[in-house]
Image: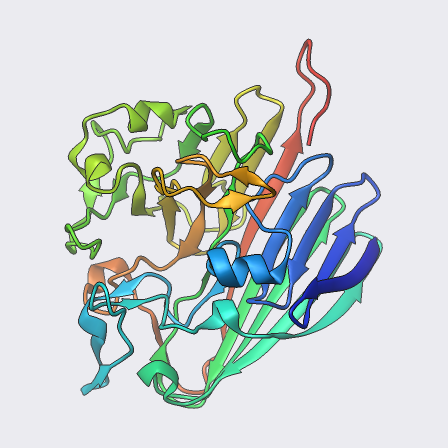
């Protein structure tokens, strides 16, 4: 495996792993984030410098924590004690654990290289009472690229006090490699019989609703355009998808999701040991970000944010994001890219 490091601007580094097939993964110590993935083209959304992330969108591709998603009014109870954490001035809710969060930290990193895979291991410490959360929390995020074109994220955590911990990675995929193209013609299969509907302010209602018979049913493969053109109330609420989906299986053997490019030459297979995936279809509307000198299309990407469902701090049916003192936390998610030969098409990545 070939590994290179270069200046990413503003004091941050860009680390690139390349396997023998020429497939590569680039990550940066700004937010322990993914910047690019692919061969001839980049299959994930990202910017060309650290400065662009800081100016345009600090969440794209970043490690998120302490708690992914929103906590209503920034309030929760833990072992009988009430906490009030930092809230967003616009919504009044906590978002992704408070800002600045994991996404803007400068993470320490080390590199491990081997014949079959290589990893960049990022570490940081979230100090006790950062944004109001209890405990000194040590976090490790390991980005690995294998010879089989699998990007694997392994996240570990350890706190000296009982706290909340629900990390994820905020990656966006666009398998065309063209940020000006919507993901509408991407085909999605999702092993999810239920989703969490949202209120107007994007807080989950606490219910689990069957996907069957709704526009959010991906148990049989269909295009994302089928959702975007639907009149489903929850789609209309956010102009797309921005919802937690509960998985039937949560292990690293059974696929949780499959996304296929419009020309059928690229397939992404997601597997995880977590019970939920938050899918967000980059519902940015006309407020287009510029990426690589081009305007990002509305619905120009789709996330697969593996985690415990947001709202778990108040809805026990969603799972638990409580991390007991001195109890190790670990989770793994695999994103495997399959490159396919299609008649009248070259092998693309």
Left or right of 18? Residue 170 is: left
User: What residue is drawn where x is 60% and y is 39%?
Assistant: 43
Asked whether residue 302 appears in the rendered view, the answer is yes
In the displayed structure, does residue 238 sit left or right of residue 297?
A: left
Tell me, what colour scheme is on the image?
Answer: rainbow
Q: How many marks?
A: 0
Q: Is residue 132 left or right of residue 43?
A: left
Q: Is residue 62 visible?
A: no
> Does 244 appear above or below 124?
above
Quadrant of the snapshot with the C terminus: top right
The residue shown at (26%, 73%) is: 87
Tell which of 179 and 83 is nearer to you: 179
Q: Is residue 301 above or below residue 138?
A: above
Q: Position of residue 271 (x, y in %)?
A: 51, 46
Q: Position of residue 240 (x, y in %)?
A: 30, 37
Q: Quadrant of residue 144?
A: bottom right
Where does the image place residue 348, in percent across and percent down from the top left? 70, 27
297 is higher (above) or lower (below) than 168: above
């Amino acid at each position: 495996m070939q590994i290179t490091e270069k200046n990413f601007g503003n004091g941050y580094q860009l680390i690139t792993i390349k396997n023998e097939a020429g497939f590569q993964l680039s990550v940066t110590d700004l937010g322990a984030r993914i910047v690019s993935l692919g061969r001839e083209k980049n299959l994930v959304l990202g910017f060309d410098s650290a400065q662009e992330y800081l100016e345009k969108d600090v969440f794209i591709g970043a490690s998120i924590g302490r708690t992914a998603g929103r906590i209503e009014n920034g309030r929760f109870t833990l072992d009988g004690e009430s906490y009030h954490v930092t809230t967003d001035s616009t919504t009044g809710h906590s978002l992704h654990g408070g800002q600045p969060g994991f996404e803007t930290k400068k993470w320490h990193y080390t590199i491990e290289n081997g014949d079959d895979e290589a990893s960049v291991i990022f570490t940081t410490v979230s100090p006790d009472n950062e944004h109001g959360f209890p405990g000194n929390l040590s976090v490790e995020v390991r980005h690995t690229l294998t010879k089989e074109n699998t990007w694997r994220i392994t996240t570990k955590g350890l706190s000296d006090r009982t706290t909340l911990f629900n990390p994820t990675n905020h990656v966006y995929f666009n398998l065309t490699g063209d940020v000006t193209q919507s993901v509408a013609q991407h085909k999605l299969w999702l092993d999810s019989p239920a989703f969490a509907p949202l209120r107007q302010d994007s807080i989950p209602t606490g219910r689990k609703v069957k996907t069957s018979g709704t526009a959010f049913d991906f148990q049989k493969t269909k295009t994302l355009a089928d959702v975007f053109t639907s009149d489903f109330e929850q789609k209309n609420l956010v102009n797309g998808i921005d919802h937690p989906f509960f998985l039937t299986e949560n292990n690293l053997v059974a696929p949780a999701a499959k996304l296929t490019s419009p020309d059928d030459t690229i397939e992404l297979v997601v597997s995880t040991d977590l019970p939920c995936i938050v899918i967000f279809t980059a519902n940015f509307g006309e407020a287009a970000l510029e990426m690589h000198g081009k305007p990002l299309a509305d619905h120009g990407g789709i996330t697969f944010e593996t985690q415990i469902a947001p709202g778990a701090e108040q809805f026990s049916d969603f799972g638990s994001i409580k991390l007991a003192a001195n109890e190790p936390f670990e989770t793994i998610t695999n994103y495997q890219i399959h490159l396919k030969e299609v008649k009248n098409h070259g092998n693309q990545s």
